Amino acid sequence: MKKVFVVYATDNVGTVVLEPIAAGDHVTCNGERRDIEIVAHDDIAYGHKIALMDIAEGDTVLKYGLSIGSASCDIRAGDHVHTHNVESNRGRGDLADRGAVSAE
Amino acid sequence: MSEFMGFYRPNGDVGIRNHLLILSGTVYANGVCERVADTIQGAVPIVHANGRCQVAPDLRVTRRYLAGTAMNPNVGGVVIIDHFKEEGMTAEDLADDIAPTGKLIATVNIRGDGGFISAIEKATRYAQDFARQISLYQREAAPMSKILFGTECGTSDTTSGLGSNPANGLAGEILIAQGGRMLMAECTEWMGCENWLTEKAASPAVAEAIVAGVQHMESRALASGEDIRGSQPTGDNMAGGLTTIEEKSMGAVKKIGDSPIIEYLEIGEAPTRTDPGNYVMYGPGMGAESISSMAAAGCQVLTFCTGGGHTSNHPVMPTIKVTANRQSFELMRDTVDVDVSGVFHDEITLAEAGQIVYDEVERVCNGYLTKSEALRDNNSFAIHRVGPSI
């Protein structure tokens, strides 16, 4: 059984800070949330994140209890969460002409 | 209330080092500065690419960086070397800015003093005299409330936001409890967590300035027509597991604790307030420009929290590297001072990690050399540009 670190109780991702995770590993959590057990779908390296629950495309990805971006596709519990399935909502000069950028 | 042993300056500031600065006014005086500094024991050259053909707002920032670096309490005396005459920032202008500190100041002009070789001779004689005068200065007991503690993060990875930064925030809280002040810059990295910061603002004006500062930096990114994600987070951030600027920001701002934010500063500007607490400064995420702006604001010491490990070191402000990544500590042991990775292995609590960081800061304030100081690797003086070269 591998463990990932959860910073805040409402987070939907955990972070690998001890041993790396391999696809098929059973994963539990330490830190602020310990009631979740999932099966990893991907190899996940040290420092990288795993989804603790299903996150639908467009939904907010939460770490520190706050948004770190939006899911750019459906993410399943146990998936590796990184730039391939999360996009930032800030500093998007490439979207400015489409009115999609807010600076709130 | 604990004390440290520091060097009192005529204006009441207290330094933790007693440097002689050989300060270049323009890029064309760099060579003379380096020759002089090579000759004199303990002299620190400050050289840079600026000082010529800058638009006025940009030149003002450069002037603030250069004068502020010399005004830093860790500096006992300064020899300023200028090449000819730059309207708006001559050696005399810099000397006027520095003069209120009451420290030793001399100016040399390469053209006015007869060229390269004569200027080296004149500046070397000033430097020899100043080096001997400041060698008489003694450390005296001073309250920790005299410390302005800068903090930075660079080459971050996930351990930064989870380990070294929160530990650092707790170390800052220990200093603030003794009347000290902590300064954080890098407003690019506040993007996405403005509310977390404004909730701590000591006044509505400070809160408004924080939001405006982030918007200004974000608008510069938008105006480039580029996707900021190409450079923030950086490639090494992403390899370390950080996905977005928001995630990087959240982890970054954790390097200050929960004390009120007393004042918002423009880049390189010294605080006008002395209240204990947090202070924040406008500026870029680029590490060397950022820590140089904090040295110019008067920080005597800085913690540099890093995930991947780092070599960054400012020439006059001891730069203590802290990591929570055990592998990085091993790979970068020559320049990383403190390892708090024990928080992830149930060896220490986060509160204990904060105390470890604070204890290292206090030792360095008392004269203990950082690893990079011992190596004389003074790599991180850099000036932020706000305009083009003309």
Image (cartoon, coloured by chain):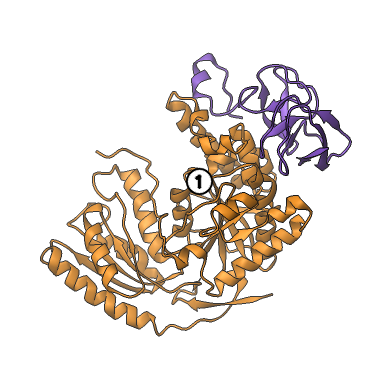
In the image, the chain rendered in orange is B
Residue at 70% in and 57% down: B170
Q: Is residue A40 rendered to the left or right of residue B280? A: right
Residue in front for this viewpoint, B329 or B248? B329
Residue in front for this viewpoint, B106 or B314? B314
Residue at 42% in and 54% down: B380
Image colour for chain A is purple
Residue in front for this viewpoint, A20 or A80? A20
How far across and down, in percent of the image, does residue A100 sit? 57, 18
Q: Is residue A15 above or below residue B7?
A: above
Q: Residues within 10 Å of mark 1 (few under 14, many from 20)?
A: many
Quadrant including the N terminus of chain B: bottom right
Write down the residue under mark 1: B282
Q: Is residue B360 above or below residue A50?
A: below
Q: Can you tell which quarter of the image residue B90 is in?
A: bottom left
How far across and down, in percent of the image, does residue B77 sit? 35, 73
Q: Element under label 1?
A: loop
Residue at 70% in and 27% down: A80
Q: Is residue B91 rendered to the left or right of residue B43? A: left
Q: Say how many tags the image has.
A: 1
Residue B267 showing in the rendered view: no
Q: Is residue A52 rendered to the left or right of residue B272? A: right
Extreme residue in the left direction: B114
